Image (spheres, rainbow, N blue to C red):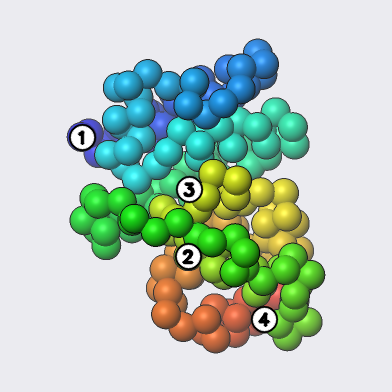
Amino acid sequence: MKHYNFSEQFRALYDKAVRLYAAGQSGAETFFTATETEFLTANGLTAQNLYDYAEDQIGSDEPGYDRALAIEFVRRDYFLNVQQGKPSKQVLDTTTMPDKTDEVHGISWLPRIIPKTKAKLRGELPAKLMYSCGGDRGFFMEHDIHPAEFLSLVWRHENDDQAIIDWVVRRSQAK
């Protein structure tokens, strides 16, 4: 695995996914060669991650390569250094997630995005969920939080939801 040029390799796959999606190709499993899929797997990523970015890039002009790279740098770091390069065998059960309208300290989406972010960090998101989807981006914009910054915050306080909540409240009040 090459570490120094990860961002260049990621960029090539990101651009490929956007190009294929724009051309009407569908299905994350159809986007990448075996070698490209091996690269993604070795870095804690999936074809679905890039497919989701491509879908939203074409549909919403977001999140953009720069945000996607920042998010995946955090995920990759966690995967390589905490998970020792071994994928989790867990998948988030979406039926256990708080509703989109649930609030804590008057902040909607926050109860939902915490477990979703933990699942992203650990590589446990089901294919039907995307980290930094339109709903997440609305939350991030409203509270002036970069998605990778939030992912890092959740990593630092992985077992302390209250610390995450307190940080978001402070950030939201400061904006």
Q: Secondary structure at mark 1?
A: loop
Instruction: Give the residue at x 35% y 28%.
Output: 37
Earlier in the chain: of badge 3 and badge 4, it is 3
Q: Are marks 3 and 1 in contact (CB under 8 Å)?
A: no
Q: Amino acid at mark 3?
A: Ala
Q: Is there any visible trace of residue 36 in the rendered image?
A: yes
Earlier in the chain: of badge 1 and badge 2, it is 1
- The answer to whether residue 148 is left or right of residue 137 is left
Instruction: Judge depth for marks 1 and 4 and give the one in front.
Output: 1
Q: Amino acid at mark 4?
A: Val
Instruction: Give the residue at x 54% y 68%.
Output: 115
Earlier in the chain: of badge 1 and badge 4, it is 1
Residue on which disc 4 sits = 169
Q: What is the quadrant of residue 112 in the picture? A: bottom right
Residue on which disc 3 sits = 70
Q: CA distance from mark 1 to mark 4?
A: 40 Å
Residue on which disc 2 sits = 118
Q: Amino acid at mark 2?
A: Lys
Q: Label for residue 173?
A: none
Instruction: Judge depth for marks 3 and 1 and give the one in front.
Output: 1
Q: Are marks 3 and 4 in contact (CB under 8 Å)?
A: no
